[in-house]
Amino acid sequence: MQNSLLWPLLADVSEQVVWYGQQLTSDEWKDVFSASLKRQKVVPGLDGGFVVCGQRTSRMAKQEFSDLIELIYAFGADHGVKWSERAIA
């Protein structure tokens, strides 16, 4: 159930939020939210940019995944995201 809710939430954020001048994909938003939730380590990439190490939603416990969903809802509320029907639990 949680995973089936995650992707519609990410799609809504991806479609409606421009992040520092960039339109991110749902996968990229998943990385952003997961890294924020887990306070992941960030290292410089080999050819520039940065790489977030170690975030995997597949390794999250049920409570962590629930916290991730709540983080996305809170972020969306702060950024004026209008949730689609598929993203309402």
Image (cartoon, grey):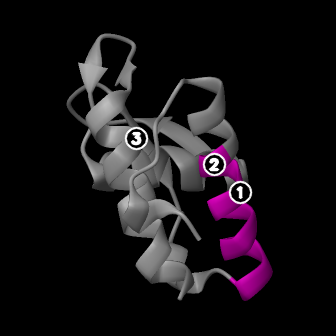
Kind of residue at badge 3: Val
Label 1 Cα crowd, 10 Å radius (few <14 / some 14-19 / many 20+): few
Q: Which residue is mark 1?
A: 70
Q: Quadrant of residue 19?
A: top left
SS majority, magenta: helix
Left or right of 60 in this view: 22 = left
87 over 24 or under it: above or below = below
* Mark 1 or 3, nearer chain start: 3
76 over 53 or under it: above or below = above
Kind of residue at badge 1: Glu
Quadrant of the drawing holding the C terminus: bottom right
Q: Which residue is mark 3?
A: 13
Magenta region includes residue 64: yes
* Mark 2 or 3, nearer chain start: 3
Q: Position of residue 77 (x, y in %)?
A: 64, 34
Label 3 Cα crowd, 10 Å radius (few <14 / some 14-19 / many 20+): many
Left or right of 70 in this view: 59 = left
